[in-house]
Image: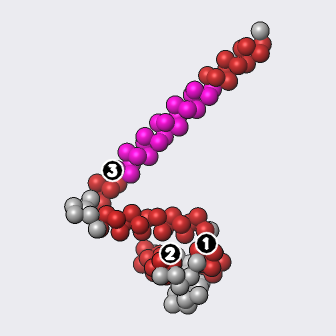
Amino acid sequence: MSMTMDENIKRWTAKRKTALVIELIQGKITVSEASRSYDLTPSEIEVWVEDAKKGMENSLRANPLDIHAQYEKQLKDLQEAYGEAMLELRARKKLQALMEREDGN
């Protein structure tokens, strides 16, 4: 395991997150080792890796999206997912109400 970073990090700045993600990509440390060493959840680390991948992909585009455009796209995707979840929830509630009515008859 690489010991280039202080194991007692209290605040994870973008620079520190980047250093950890690079160590993960280079195979110097695993997610489980980083999780134990830095008292982070594996899912937290995996989110940082995913964010880094998105940033790399964007920076390698012929026409990179600016930060605002990235934010707007992410917001739109989240709003669509939320809308779909709400529709599914409403449909389930209606189905449950219909089933309760049928059971009551």
**Is 15 placed left or right of 100 in the picture?**
left
Amino acid at dot 2 = Trp
Q: Which residues are magenta?
A: 72-93
Q: Does 101 appear above or below 2?
A: above
Q: Residue at x 57, y 26 (%)?
A: 91
**Is 92 placed left or right of 5 in the picture?**
right
Location of mark 1 (residue):
40
- Between discs 1 and 2, the one toward the N terminus: 2
State yes or no: residue 88 in magenta: yes
Marks 1 and 3 sit apart, C-alpha to C-alpha, by: 29 Å
Name the disc covering residue 72, or none.
3
Location of mark 2 (residue):
12
- Residue 95 locus on image (x, y percent): 64, 23
Furthest residue toward bottom: 3
Dividing the image into 4 quarters, which one contains the C terminus? top right
Marks 1 and 2 sit apart, C-alpha to C-alpha, by: 10 Å
State yes or no: residue 47 in magenta: no
Q: Residue at x 58, y 64 (%)?
A: 43
Furthest residue toward top: 105
- Residue 62 locus on image (x, y percent): 22, 63
Amino acid at dot 3 = Glu
